[in-house]
Amino acid sequence: MKNDPVVAIAGITGAVGAQFIATLDKRRFPVRTLKALASARSAGKTLDFRGQPIVIEKLDENSFDGVDIALFSAGSSVSRRFSPIAAKAGAVVIDNSSAFRMDPNVPLVIPEINAGRIAGHKGIIAVPNCSAITALVPLWPIHRTKRIRRLILSTYQAASGAGAAAMEELLESTRANLAGQSYQPRILPHSYAFNVFNHDTKIDPETGYNEEETKVIRETRKIFEDDGIAIGVTCVRVPVLRAHSQAITFECEQPISEDEVRTILSNAPGVKIVDDRAKNYFPMPIDASGQDDVLVGRIRKDLSDASGHSISMFVAADQLLKGAALNAIQIAELLPERAMA
């Protein structure tokens, strides 16, 4: 990998695309040339990158000639079509969609957990589901110390997970609701303002689980390389703009205390403990928004488990950053190191 790579961003006009640009700049990622790729309706428009105007190009089969790193956040169908083309052209694809996550030949990477998997890529590296990332960054150091055998998650997912249009719909519907006006949802299936509803993915008629829940279960087992973990997940959409939150209860093979969890997490990369019982101050999406770390708090013994093997906690993380763009760019930052190794 070159020290000054040509970087392409597919889906640059979306919410994650904007975060790709901001995160590349914030982390001073070396970029010789940036190629901005989007659909035909955005082609010809310009955006700013490090003080220079960049003309958006239409994404097509010839977009990746000379590209070293291709960051994808344009949806699964686009990734399935164009990622292999980009990889064949010589680019390393880092894909934010679900298209390749469960492909056994594609590494599914959270750098704080399994950066070593990057070296085994065959042209495509997958970024996990945002809810999986939010949970697994703090759970991994615990799992390494005292294996987690059972995991129960309830997610409270922000509009950003459904894209920039869903974020705008939340704002518009809230304004309409406050003004006493009716609002017909266009992006999401239910009224969003002041409402909570089941995650807007397809329900499996046999299991009753939605696709988001199934993704978290399958991706957790792949990332932890442990098919024996029992996992239950409930995913809901909440009227928050850009940070996901989760209530987590985990059961370990060995007894584990609150103090042990705090000690483990105080040294964990990508984790910030926010756990002030005296002030009743714990992780909130408003605080997680714009932050790189996963906020963790409400660390307490699970009183339903008299054996002392279980802990409950609450976490929050920026879905557009650690849940998407930041995780992808952290992977890109490791490519030169892994290549030289």
Image (spheres, rainbow, N blue to C red):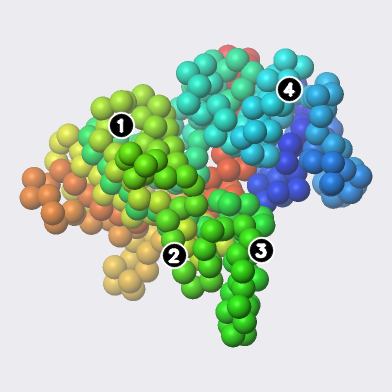
At a point 57% along the width and 58% down the height, the residue shown is 188
Which mark is first along the chain, 4 or 3?
4
Of 52 and 219, the residue lying toward us: 219
Q: Quadrant of the N terminus?
A: top right
Which mark is first along the chain, 4 or 2?
4
Image depth: mark 1 or mark 3 in front:
3
Left or right, 244 with respect to 297, comes to right
Image depth: mark 2 or mark 1 in front:
2
Which mark is first along the chain, 3 or 2?
3
Secondary element under disc 4, as helix, strand or loop, is helix
Residue of label 1: 144
Residue of label 3: 168
Residue of label 4: 86
Image depth: mark 3 or mark 4 in front:
3
Please determine whether, in this image, residue 166 is positioned above or below residue 256.
Answer: below
- Residue 196 got which mark? 2
